[in-house]
Image: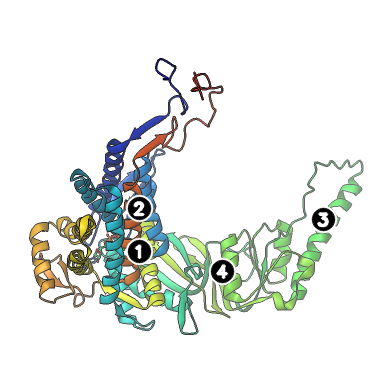
Amino acid sequence: MLSGKQPILVLREGTERERGRDAQHNNIRAAMAIADAVRSTLGPKGMDKMLVDSMGDVVITNDGVTILKEIDIEHPAAKMIVEVAKTQDEECGDGTTSAVIFAGELLKKALDLIEQNVHPTVIADGYRMASKEACKILESIAENVKPNDEEILMYIASTSLTGKAAAANKDLLSDIAYKAVSAVSDEENGKVTVDLDNVKIEKKHGGSVEDTELIEGIVLDKERVHPSMPKSVKNAKILLLNTALEIKKTEVDAQIRISDPNQLQKFLDEEEAMLRKMVSKIEASGANVVLCQKGIDDLAQHYLSKAGIFAVRRVKKSDMEKLARATGALVISEIDEIEKSDMGYAGKVEEKKISDDEMVFVTECKKAKAVTILIRGGTEHVIDEIERGMHDALSVVSVTIEDGKMTAGGGSAATEISLGLRNYASSVGGREQMAVESFADAIDIIPKALATNAGIDAIDMLIELKKAHKEGKKYYGVNILKGKPGDMKKMNVMEPMRVGLQAIRSATETANMILRIDDVIAAKGGGGGGGMPPGGMGGMPPGGMGGMPEM
Ligand SMILES: Nc1ncnc2c1ncn2[C@@H]1O[C@H](COP(=O)(O)OP(=O)(O)O)[C@@H](O)[C@H]1O
Ligand SMILES: [Mg+2]
C-alpha cells in the first residue's frame, strides 16, 4: 500500500478548498446575504442606500443593480447573485431587486430541504419544473397592451418610478418616457422594436427636476467654437466629420530647422493655406453646420466663422452616431471626399443657454427617430438618481411595447403564481414535489418584502392575499396605503410581463447553479479577482512532483 509515503499535492500551496456541506452552506449564506442587503429597497416604501467608494465618492440610490455594482463583493457565490441583477437589468431594465431577493429566498428554502436530506440535484430539478410552470402561470394572467395605449404605458412607467427619488415627478417623467419610446419605436411586419440607443440622455444641473424635458432631436453639451458664428441656423445642412480640422502632426519626431525669417513666414503661410483650403472645401459643399468629432484649429475656426458656418468640435463618438441617424448624414473622414449626398439635414441647429452653460440643439431632424431627454435637477446626486429612474421607466415602456404584454404588480402576480404552483406540486409527486412547494413559498417573498418595507405585518398580509386570490381576486396585491390587499389593476400598478418572466428564470438558474456546487477550490488570493497571478511566486509547490504514487 501507499501508507507512509509523502502526500500527493495536486493543488498549489495556499489554495483554499471547501467541500460538501460546508461549501454548500457557505455559498448559500453568502448569496442570501446579498439578497438581504437589497431587500429593504424594494417597493414603494423601499429605502435608499448611500454608498461610499474607496475614493470617498457618494452614490445615493434605490436601484438594486446599482447598489450591487457599486459594492465590492468578494465571495464567488455572492458574485453570482450580482450577475442575476445585471442580467435582469440588461434584459428588462427593471425588477433587479425582485430578482435578487427571489434568488436569495430560493436558496434559503433549499437550505431547509438540504437539512431534511433532499439532495441538491433533486431540489434543482424541482425548481426547474416549478420555474417553467410559474412562467406559464404568469403568461396566462398577462394582458395585452397596444403600442398606442398611452394611459396604460404611462401607468407602467409610473409603477417603475414608485419609491424612487424620481417618484415626486412621476407624471412628468412617465409622460416623457412614453413619448420618447414612442418616438423611437419601429414597426415592421407587425413586430414592434424599440432601440433605446436612439434616446439620448443629457444631464445639466441647475433648475429643478420639473424642468426636465424631451427634445425631438439631439442635444449636445457643447458650444459653438467661435463667438462670431451664427447662434442659430435654419435649414441646417450638416456635415459630420470625424477628422480634425487641423494640420496633421507627423507620426515621427521631426525637426525643421529654419535659418531665415522668410522661411518661417513661408512655413506659416503654407499652414494657413492648407487650413483655408480645408474650409473652402467645406464651404463649397454647401454645409452650414459642421459637427466635428476631433479638434478644430483656431485659424480654421476663424475661417469657418467668416464663412458663416456654425461649428462644434470634439463631439462624442456616440453622439456622432446618433446625429448621423437623426439627420441622415454620413460621417466623413476625408475632407477631400465630401459629397452633397453625405450631408445631413435638420430644420434648426441652435445654441441655447441652459442654466449657466451653452448647449447645442439639433432639432426638426429629417428622421425624428432620435430624441434627447434633458434631465435637470438641483444637484448631481439628484440628477444621477433621476437618470436611473428614467432608465427604468424607458425600459419598462419599451419592453411592454415590444412584447405587448403586462401583468399587475404589487405582489399580485407572485401570489397567483404561488397558489398555482401548490396545485401543480401535487401532480409532481416524489421529492421534487417538496422542491416545487418550496419554490411556491419562496416567491411569497415579493409581497412579504413589499409589506414589511411599508411597516405592514407580512404574515397577515400573506394570509389575506391568499384568501383574496382563492376567491378569484387575481389582481389583489399589497395596498401600501391601507395596509390591506387591494386591486392593483384598479390602482394602476402595472408591470411588463417580461420583468416577471426574466426574474423567475434568472433567479432559478442562478439558485440552481449555486445549489449544485459542492466543492469550492479557490486559488490563493482568488475570489477577489486580484491576488497572485498563477506561478506568481515561481517554482514548484513543495513535494509537487516528489510523491508520485507507484503505478
Ligand atoms: N403603488 C404600488 N403599490 C404596491 N406595490 C408597488 C407599487 N408600485 C410598485 N410596486 C411594486 O414594487 C416592486 C418593485 O420595486 P422596486 O423597488 O422598483 O424594485 P425592482 O428593482 O425589483 O424593480 C414591484 O413588485 C412592484 O409591483
Ligand atoms: Mg423597479
At 30% across and 68% down in the image, what residue appears?
Answer: 135
**At 77% across and 75% down in the image, what residue appears?**
284
Q: In the image, is residue 131 above or below residue 528?
A: below
**Does 143 sit above or below residue 7?**
below
Front: mark 4 or 2: 2
Q: Amino acid at mark 3?
A: Glu
Q: Earlier in the sequence, mark 3 or mark 2?
A: 3
Provide the residue designation for mark 3.
Answer: 271
Residue at left offset 40%, top offset 72%: 398
Apparent side of residue 333 relative to residue 509 in the rendered image (left or right): right
Residue at label 4? Answer: 322
CA distance for labels 4 and 2: 36 Å
Q: Label 4 is placed on what type of residue?
A: Lys
Q: Which mark is residue 510?
A: 2
How far is disc 1 from disc 3 in space, using C-alphas? 60 Å
Q: Which residue is mark 1?
A: 502
Is 20 or 38 nearer to us in this picture?
20
